[in-house]
Amino acid sequence: MIRFESVTKKYGKKTILNKLSFEINQGDFVVLIGPSGCGKTTTLKSINRLIEPDGGKIYVDGRDIMKENPVELRRKIGYVIQQIGLFPNMTVEQNIAVVPKLLKVPKEEWQQRVKDLLNLVAMPYEENAHMYPSELSGGQQQRIGVLRALAASPPIVLMDEPFGALDPLTRDSLQEEVKKLQKKLKKTIVFVTHDMDEALRMADVVIFMDQGEIVQMASPEEMLQNPASPLVKSFLGKHLNNGAVLLASDVMKSRVLKVHREMQTLQSVELMRNRDVNSLIVINDDETYAGTISIERIKSAGKAGTQIGGLLTMEAPVVQVSDPAQSAFELLMESPTGYVIVLHEDQTVAGLITKTSMAKAMGETLWGGDAV
Amino acid sequence: MNNLPNYILEHLVIVLIATAIAVVIGILLGVIAYWVKWAEQAILWLVEIIQTIPSLALLALLMIFFGLGNPTIIAGLVLYALMPIVRNAHIGLTGVENHLKDAAKGMGMSRLQRLVKVEIPLSFPLIFSGIRISVVNSLSIAVMGVLIGAGGLGFPVYRGIQTNNMEMILTGAIPVVLMALVFDHLMNRFEKKLMRS
């Protein structure tokens, strides 16, 4: 969809973009991020030729943009800026309809489009279309800014820190709306931000830039797991610890001793003694979790020569592998048995969380895998 | 002085024609100064120089080209009216916020479209303020027209001076002052309204 081939831009002696090459696929939400002066905005503005590179080539839809008429190119690419940039001399409707009018779309058509778009963001046409931008709140103004960029149905939309000037609450809801719109309308979005929260939240692909070069281009998950440089790491900051939610499966030990319910009581006591444990996880014939049995239980209620199946208790707390580690942690603290059973979706036993396994996993998360 | 309404009307017509021409030329020069970097200083400097030429001298000069009568005074008024209009147009156009120009460009407006749809509408309050100053100036300068055979309220003023008739001077002068006040007031109000929206 968008392809950069060793694109270079210099201002005087300062290199802004240094042989930048990358490719953006159709329908992806791509976030450009990096410290100020890293070239992210320059990269964005090169796509609609607001800035023209000194070297290299940029292709949009397979066509070299330097060979296209810049005015026509820009009409095919939506553009949203941080300062919103609604024209104060035009109403909401006129603002949204700017590009369709430039493209000479018939009036009935663009009017319908304005109505549809306003509906998408729950700003009814009748109430809002004839307002002037100054009569709207900042969040509403930027909603209109986004709609204006979408009005001519461009396949690509460029967004230059669009929510940077909004309060956190408004920013949250706009991020959600834009992400929804993008999925619904299947747009390719290139989005500049310096806010890692925003990047991780919105992006399919994050491009991390520094000094005019790409440091890392990866999905948010991949970047969180393998930050390519200390700079990326410092940008990810708190997300490295809390950003990716720990799951029960991350804090359990998976090599656990399981026995069938048909096992004889004496045999199981022997096993516990040998392994130096005081209870066993018991499973049914189809491998599903049946319960637990402790050595005390056998001593108090069991008779020699019977099967353990009749003595099972369900006192150990149970979680699923995909449950958050936090809830497993809380259960573990309250558990009478001192451990929590982790089950797969098909009720088979996946592992066991003990205080030791929990502490180990937390230590790894906090100080990195090598520290523990 | 039963001719007074005619003098007033003629005076007004001369000023309005001159203003109309000055608005067209003035905005055009303002746009050129805004668009063409190298012409910017030259244009601003030129309209300022014109302003400093004494009206009598300017009219005498223009008479060589336009002869006696109304065309000469109109040409003179146009020249004097240019400065405030060109200046304000230039300030207004350069002063349109950069992010709006950026947005307009980024959405695919050509230079002319940006000018007509965004930049001129947004700088219009300032341009209008320039026009108001021009009109008020022109109303008083137009009195000089009588010296080169033009009509208007200059006639009773000049006649009054020649015959040492104070009453006659005032019959010419008072309507000029009143018209200037009225125009200034009305246009000022309109201007405030523009600024607010």
Image: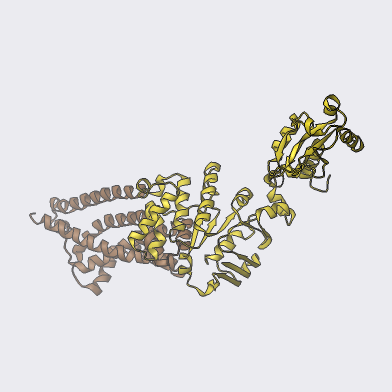
Residue A347 visible in the shown view:
yes
Front-lying residue, A356 or A123: A356
**Residue B125 drawn at (x, y percent):** 35, 53
Q: Is residue B182 left or right of residue A14?
A: left
Residue at 74% x, 29% y is A334
Colour yellow belongs to chain = A
**Residue A63 drawn at (x, y percent):** 54, 73
Quadrant occupied by the C terminus of chain A: top right
Task: Choose top left, top right, bottom left or bottom right for residue B4.
Answer: bottom left
Colour brown belongs to chain = B
**Residue B59 drawn at (x, y percent):** 26, 67
Residue at 39% x, 51% y is A92
Task: Choose top left, top right, bottom left or bottom right for residue B148.
Answer: bottom left
Residue at 82% x, 27% y is A297
Give the vertical position of A195 relative to A310 (above or below). Answer: below
Front-lying residue, A351 or A68: A351
Query: Among all residues in the image, which is located at the extreme top?
Result: A300
